[in-house]
Amino acid sequence: MSTLPLTQPSLSPVGFNVLAWSAVMSEKLNPIADRLKKIGYDGVECFIDNQGVDTYRQFGAHLRQVGLQSTCVMVVGPDENPVSESAKIREQALIYLKGAIDRAHAMDASVICGPFHSAFATFSRREPQQDEYARSAEVLHAAGEYAKQANIVLAPEALNRFECYLCNTMDQLLDLVRRADHPNVRAMFDTHHANIEEKRFPEAIHTIFPVLSHVHISENDRGTPGDGHIPWDDTFRTLAELKYNGWMTIEAFTRNDVDFANSINVWREYNDPWDVAENGFTFIKKMQAQYAS
């Protein structure tokens, strides 16, 4: 009697965010990508700035050459704030998002994540208002329509209360994504921010899962995943139970890029970036195997 072969579970691809080295896109990232590939990573994540599209196209070509996929992360500032009362600023927000989509598309990226639902570290000195969610959702919907043409998913991110006021929790983020009402506007879950804002990880992940498309694996101190107190067993168990198979991308920060580090209040070194990359990859693979079913 013949038996059917056992099928292996579909594990999430593993990525690494090169912000640990630089927020500036350049050919200097090429050898970093090469080494990440040798470690075993499936892709890299890079920051989108205002450089020309060709710069991203060239990096994307290098990634394809070495067999790596890509995702992107971005922020918006007060001059392109989707929640602004000014129609002119909201129009600029959409232009900025479209430019980011063009750059990501040139790199052949599949996801743009980040807190681009509102301006980073820009506060109104009051709790988020319903009209702010409505304005942000309108901009995100329009950006989602543009991203659809490039086959890119926009995954806005909830940040902790010290960096953002519009979306701190998965409840708030889910509400915003549903208001945006576009298949190319989904959501991401970041373990660092959730460690500050969520009561319990399993409930938070269940809340956002209907629209979840991206996960940042980030330790409580932004160092090597597995070295701190993030509830990793809860995280990997819940994602496995829900059969999540999107990206798991390590986001860790250093002072290698001083301007970027200063902009996000990173004042010390947590771990060497290659320690994060090598030990973090081993940690994710171990946890994926432990909870695979």
Image (spheres, rainbow, N blue to C red):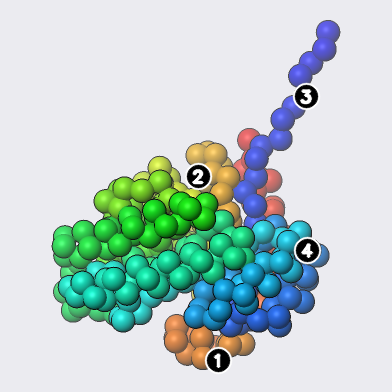
Residue position for label 2: 238
Secondary-structure class at tag 2: helix
Residue position for label 4: 65
Classed neighbour count for the residue bearing mark 4: other residues with Cα under 10 Å, few (<14), some (14–19), many (≥20): few
- Give how far apart the Cα atoms at labels 1 and 3 are: 52 Å
Which of the two discs, 2 and 3, labels the residue nearer the N terminus? 3
Which of the two discs, 2 and 4, labels the residue nearer the N terminus? 4
Kind of residue at badge 4: Gln
Q: Nearer the viewer, mark 2 or mark 4?
A: 4
Kind of residue at badge 2: Thr
Residue located at (48% from left, 64% from top): 101
Residue located at (56% from left, 56% from top): 110
Which of the two discs, 3 and 4, labels the residue nearer the N terminus? 3
- Give how far apart the Cα atoms at labels 3 and 4 are: 33 Å
- Tell me residue 33's x, y (percent): 72, 71
Classed neighbour count for the residue bearing mark 3: other residues with Cα under 10 Å, few (<14), some (14–19), many (≥20): few
Nearest the viewer among 220 and 45 is: 45
Which of the two discs, 2 and 1, labels the residue nearer the N terminus? 2
